[in-house]
């Protein structure tokens, strides 16, 4: 398999058509070795328009142990409009690929993962690729859903998976002028959403596109009525 040709086709056939046109983002996607962050058993899927499993077994995939589609990662990265001086929080490290992308655009990335095997995988992949400004924090799921206030506030927060709704505790960890991207809602249709904080109690949100992503663990689910 010609990885460079596959990477080029991924960008031109999947990512550009999703309105990812930022030259810096496209250049980064053309140089970052996505295949280095994919488990060996699924390496052939590195450039395919699909979610890539990260842990064996159906239960793991159902719980969100996967990489999001390349076009989704790229669009979320573009929407954040990161600057080199900024500090970022990611929840749901997975393979570490999104953390690597964020780290190349920002000054510092803190990324939270509740599965020890994935935290170890991500640390190794980041090290192999020379990403030194991203720190993987292994946390339990409930603690991860609360963010990392001790290192905040943050210029940007990324939820690499879906949640029923974004907790207020995470929004409070944004600096004024900070941005948060998350995939919000319930199947069969969820919405990628951008939230901007313009003041101490002022937040504005904008829906970006419809998609579906596995749940992040530890986040509250809406109460279901039983008759």
Image: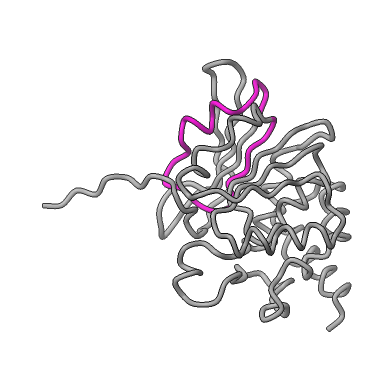
Residue at (88, 54) in percent of width and height: 27
Q: Nearer the viewer, residue 204 or 19?
A: 204
* Residue 207 percent location from the top left of the image: 55, 41
Identify the residue at image location x=32%, y=45%: 222
Q: Is residue 63 left or right of residue 225?
A: right
In this rendering, would 138 be left or right of 124? left
Tell me if residue 86 comes above or below residue 224 in the rendering: above
Q: Position of residue 141 (x, y in %)?
A: 48, 50
Along the line of sight, the residue nearer the viewer: 19 or 168 = 168
Q: Is residue 62 above or below residue 110?
A: below
Residue farthest along the top direction in this orientation: 200
Q: Residue furthest left?
A: 227
Magenta stretch? Answer: 155-178
Of 187 and 128, which appears nearest the observer?
Answer: 128
Question: Was residue 110 drawn as part of the magenta stretch in this picture?
Answer: no
User: Left of 222 or right of it: where is 75?
Assistant: right
| Residue 175 drawn in magenta | yes
**Residue 140 point in image, percent of width and height:** 50, 49
In this rendering, the answer to whether 90 lies above or below 177 is below
- The part of the image, by quadrant, that contains residue 126 is bottom right
Query: In the image, what residue occupies the spot 74% across and 45% down?
Result: 78
In which quadrant of the rendered view does residue 54 lie?
Answer: bottom right
On the image, the x and y values in percent for residue 157 come to 63, 38
Residue positioned 67% across, 23% down in the render? 177
* Number of marks: 0
């Amino acid at each position: 398999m010609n990885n460079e040709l596959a990477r080029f086709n991924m960008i031109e056939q999947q990512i550009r058509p999703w309105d990812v046109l930022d030259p810096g983002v496209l250049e980064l996607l053309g140089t970052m070795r996505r295949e280095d962050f994919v488990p060996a058993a699924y390496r052939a899927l590195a450039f395919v328009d699909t979610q890539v499993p990260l842990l064996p077994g159906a239960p793991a995939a159902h719980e969100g142990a996967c990489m999001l589609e390349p076009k989704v990662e790229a669009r979320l990265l573009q929407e954040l409009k990161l600057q080199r001086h900024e500090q970022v929080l990611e929840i749901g490290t997975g393979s570490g690929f999104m953390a690597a992308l964020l780290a190349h655009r920002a000054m510092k990335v803190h990324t939270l993962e509740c599965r020890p095997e994935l935290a170890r995988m991500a640390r190794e992949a980041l090290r192999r690729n020379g990403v030194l400004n991203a720190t993987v924090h292994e946390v339990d799921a409930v603690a991860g859903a609360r963010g990392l206030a001790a290192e905040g506030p943050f210029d940007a927060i990324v939820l690499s998976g879906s949640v029923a709704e974004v907790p207020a505790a995470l929004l409070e960890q944004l600096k004024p002028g900070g941005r948060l991207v998350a995939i919000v809602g319930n199947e069969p249709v969820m919405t990628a959403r951008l939230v901007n904080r313009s003041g101490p109690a002022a937040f504005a949100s904008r829906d970006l596109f419809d998609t579906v992503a596995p749940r992040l663990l530890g986040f509250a689910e809406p109460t279901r009525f039983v008759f």
